[in-house]
Image: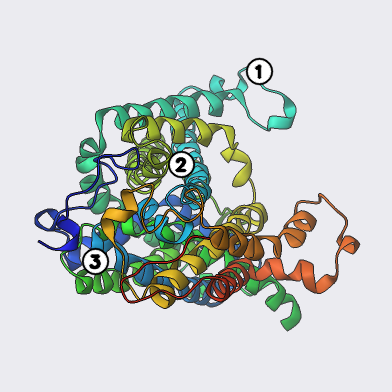
Amino acid sequence: MNQNETTLPSSSLYSEDLAPVPAEKRTWNTWNYTALWISMSLCIPTYMLASSLIGGGMNWWEAILTIFLGNTVVLIPMLLNGHAGTKYGIPFPVFARASFGVRGANIPAMLRAIVACGWFGIQTWIGGLAIYLMLKIWFPSIEHLPAIFPSSWQLQTGPAITFFLFWLVNMFIVYLGVESIKKLLVFKAFFLPIAALALFFWAVNAGHGLGPILNHPSRFSSNAQFWKFFFPALNAMIGFWATLSLNIPDFTRYAKSQRAQITGQAIGLPTSMTLFSFIGVVVTSATVIIYGETIWDPVILAGRFDSKLLVTIAMIAVALSTLATNIAANIVSPANDFANLAPLVINFRKGGYITGIIGILIFPWKLIADPSGYIYNWLGGYSSLLGPIGGILIADYYFIRKQHLVVKDLYQKNGLYSFSSGVNLYAIIALLSGILLNVPGFLVLVKAVKPETFWPWLTNLFDYSWFVGFVVSGFVYYLLMPKQNAVGALPAT
């Protein structure tokens, strides 16, 4: 009997959703992980990620290089954190108990869950907007419904109605369970690449060939101006998958072997993100030639087509593929995170409902209203939270514990990972160290304080928020934590 098959305690820290996956149920191979990343990468936000760089002033190769570099960097913590999931069969919230404590793990779990709620809201808004644009070409009066929301919400009545209807569909899928989404994932895996290629060839044809499109120049007048945009953009590219770099054990716990998850992810993530982003870059650059303006939102672009039938087909496809992505990428993990708060009370379904409600309260239509807000405020903002968590997890698992965990103690209130009342104070100090350094820059960015409030070098750190948080928190944690002995026990803090 290996460690993963040891009888686990019956406690409030244990539930079927959080239990280690037994060896016989670990069936994912290299192709499954490659397909997972292809499926998750082929989504509207990936397209918008690339096109927002064009909207921000980059030319095609600058945008593609930035995306490739960002995804190559984030692949490293993805593979490192994925190791624990494969070795022990545990999900992210349980993995975090080793470094943060059995109760303290709720802190990184909740930070990660709130970000997932934001992504859920964004994807739901995109799907709802697609339905709205489809209805508008058949029923134009929907555009002129009386306003019912405060002007500060920046929310029209028509899009709000379709957003809520699409939200209800998502919640119904949560009620049915994740298994119900399998057919939609198959549909997406076949249809969305075809639709993306069709959009690519339309752009090349309407833009008079690939040459004029790729000749679209960079709008930066100097190298200094380019670098000022590049580093926050690179930080945002890393931030795009910073959530998954933490909770990747939620998926790698099903892997047949370390080789399967490592090879599958290395093949699937950088390549699929770069290729699909290239389509986004080409199409967005073509809109400048075709329409005389940069249209970085593909849903808005599809709504500009002349054919009602074509728009209808495109919008239904966007809605269905968005629904599949939303459940797979933005419900599974936060549902586990919320379940970790009270395993005996909150199950997957209830966790999914909590995700859905918070996804509305975040006002997702504001998050993606413009490229700068999408890159700087949203992606850059949560990078400053998730980078420190990643640094702590890796420092603890690789440098403190030498990849050795005692699984049964991860589910015990008084085990090796109880620390001080279930919370590792060293991890909290390290987490705050990484986050606080990025706070001044964020406050200046959202105009909460004037730039002269802080030293310029301190506010500029926010441009590198993921890197700063990852390195500082990981280093502080390593310095503070007592080093592990031979059997893995650590003294309480």
Rounded to the nearest angstrom, the CA distance separating label 2 from label 1 is 24 Å
Question: If you read the primary sequence from the N terminus, does the residue marked by circle 3 or circle 2 appear first?
Answer: 3
SS type, badge 3 = helix
Amino acid type of the residue tagged 1 in the rendering: Ile
Residue at figure coordinates x 25%, y 53% from the top left: 189
Residue at figure coordinates x 25%, y 29% from the top left: 176
Q: According to the image, label 3 marks what residue?
A: 87
SS type, badge 2 = helix
Q: Toward the viewer: 81 or 308?
A: 81
Rendered-image quadrant of the N terminus: bottom left
Q: According to the image, label 2 marks what residue?
A: 120
Q: Are marks 3 and 2 in contact (CB under 8 Å)?
A: no
- Looking at the rendered image, the disc whose residue lies closer to the viewer, 3 or 1, is 3
Q: According to the image, label 1 marks what residue?
A: 148
Amino acid type of the residue tagged 3 in the rendering: Lys
Q: In which quarter of the image is residue 485?
A: bottom left
Pinpoint residue 82: horizontal percent, then vertical percent.
33, 65
* Mark 2 surroundings within 10 Å by alpha-carbon count, few (fewer than 14), some (14 through 19), many (20 or more): many
Decide: is 113 above or below 397.
above
- Looking at the rendered image, the disc whose residue lies closer to the viewer, 2 or 1, is 2
Amino acid type of the residue tagged 2 in the rendering: Phe
Decide: is 178 above or below 40.
above
Pinpoint residue 35: horizontal percent, then vertical percent.
24, 60
Q: How many marks?
A: 3
Q: Are marks 3 and 1 in contact (CB under 8 Å)?
A: no
Residue 90 at least partly seen: no
Left or right: where does residue 36 sit relative to residue 294? left
